[in-house]
């Protein structure tokens, strides 16, 4: 299955997955990563206007340095899109 979505949305979803799997509140995540709790709240609420791809990658790396992110770029006739390849 291939889904075209913005990279910031994919990264924020991964961050939320890590928070949920570890049962981390925004305050616990802040203590663990030194990233502001308000930033985790914004990520959870999909308020992503303030976040760059690099910033989200940094947050994700602080939460889980062992995570692997694989991206596939597909060149179209009018624009280049980012696709996430879902694995079973």
Image (cartoon, rainbow, N blue to C red):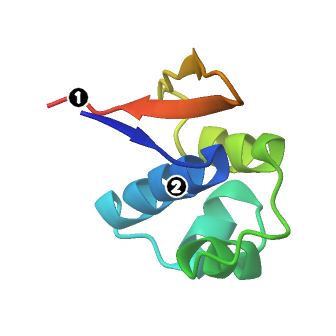
The image position of residue 79, as x and y in percent, is 71, 30
Horizontal side, residue 38 vs residue 66: left or right? right
Residue at x 78%, y 72% (from the top left corner):
36
| Depicted 22 relative to depicted 65: above or below | below
How far apart marks 1 and 2 lie (CA) works out to 18 Å
First reached walking from the N terminus: tag 1 or tag 2? 2
Q: Secondary structure at mark 1?
A: loop
Is the residue marked by circle 2 packed among few (<14), some (14-19), or many (20+) residues within 10 Å?
Answer: many
The image position of residue 84, as x and y in percent, is 43, 33
Q: Nearer the viewer, residue 29 or 77?
A: 77
Q: Secondary structure at mark 2?
A: helix
Identify the residue position indicated by label 2 in the image.
Answer: 15
Placement of the C terminus among the 4 image quadrants: top left
Residue at x 35%, y 66% (from the top left corner):
20
| Depicted 62 relative to depicted 31: above or below | above
Residue at x 35%, y 60% (from the top left corner):
22
| Depicted 49 relative to depicted 58: above or below | below
Horizontal side, residue 1 vs residue 10: left or right? left
Q: Which mark is in front, 1 or 2?
A: 1
Identify the disc placed on residue 19. none
Is the residue marked by circle 1 packed among few (<14), some (14-19), or many (20+) residues within 10 Å?
Answer: few
Residue at x 52%, y 48% (from the top left corner):
5
Q: Nearer the viewer, residue 55 or 26?
A: 55
Say which quarter of the image contains residue 12.
bottom right
Q: Nearer the viewer, residue 59 or 84?
A: 84
The image position of residue 18, as x and y in percent, is 42, 54
Identify the disc placed on residue 87. 1
């Amino acid at each position: 299955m291939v889904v075209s979505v913005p990279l910031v949305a994919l990264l924020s979803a991964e961050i939320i997955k890590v928070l949920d799997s570890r049962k981390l509140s925004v305050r616990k995540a802040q203590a663990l990563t030194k990233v502001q709790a308000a930033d985790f709240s914004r990520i959870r609420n999909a308020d992503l206007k303030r976040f760059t791809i690099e910033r989200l990658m940094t947050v994700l790396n602080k939460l889980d340095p062992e995570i692997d992110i694989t991206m596939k770029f597909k060149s179209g006739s009018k624009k280049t899109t980012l696709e996430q390849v879902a694995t079973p």
